[in-house]
Amino acid sequence: TRKARLRVAKADPWSVMKVSFLLSIALGICTVVASAVLWMVMDAMGVFSTVGGTISEATGSNESNGFDLQSFLSLPHVLTFSGIIAVIDVVLATALATLGAFIYNLSAGFVGGIELTLAEDE
């Protein structure tokens, strides 16, 4: 088998930013879809009506002036909140990955980078 020792001396911040942006977009889409599926499963199981009934029973309020959990945790509200979280995640993950590339380039200048040994399969 042939082996090669390589050193990652520099990570291009622009390419790191593009890749991290695409990966965080995919993660944001997964977050929104997963929250919608989880909401639908919980609604089909009757979790919101059960917990809402328990809250109104515990507070002693009737339907007209009490806290309505089902309207507060409706699907549009949940999807809006998860969409906002996904957008914040895209911005933060892209910025942190790009900043990480800059920090890696600075530290690789001092210590030489990460050394890898690559081997060829037979």
Image: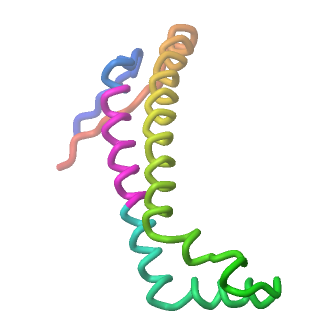
In the picture, the quarter occupied by the N terminus is top left
Picture layout, residue 85 above or below residue 107: below
Picture layout, residue 91 above or below residue 85: above
Picture layout, residue 87 above or below residue 8: below
Residue 65, percent from left and from top: 71, 77
Residue pictured at 44% horizontal, 69% vertical: 75
Count of numbered marks: 0
Q: Nearer the viewer, residue 39 or 54?
A: 54
Q: Nearer the viewer, residue 82 or 16?
A: 82
Residue pictured at 41% horizontal, 16% vertical: 9
Q: Is residue 12 magenta?
A: no
Extreme residue in the front direction: 64
Which quadrant of the structure image shows residue 66? bottom right
Picture layout, residue 116 above or below residue 68: above
Which quadrant of the structure image shows residue 33? bottom left
Q: Nearer the viewer, residue 57 or 6?
A: 57
Residue pictured at 39% horizontal, 73% vertical: 37
Magenta segment boundaries in residue numbering: 17-32
Q: Nearer the viewer, residue 7 or 104?
A: 104
Extreme residue in the right direction: 59
Residue 91, percent from left and from top: 46, 33
Residue 4, percent from left and from top: 29, 28
Q: Main secondary structure of the magenta part?
A: helix
Extreme residue in the top direction: 109
Residue 41, percent from left and from top: 44, 82
The colouring scheme, among rainbow, by chain, secondary structure or one colour, is rainbow
Residue pictured at 43% horizontal, 57% vertical: 31
Q: Is residue 3 left or right of residue 88?
A: left
Q: Is residue 29 left or right of residue 90?
A: left
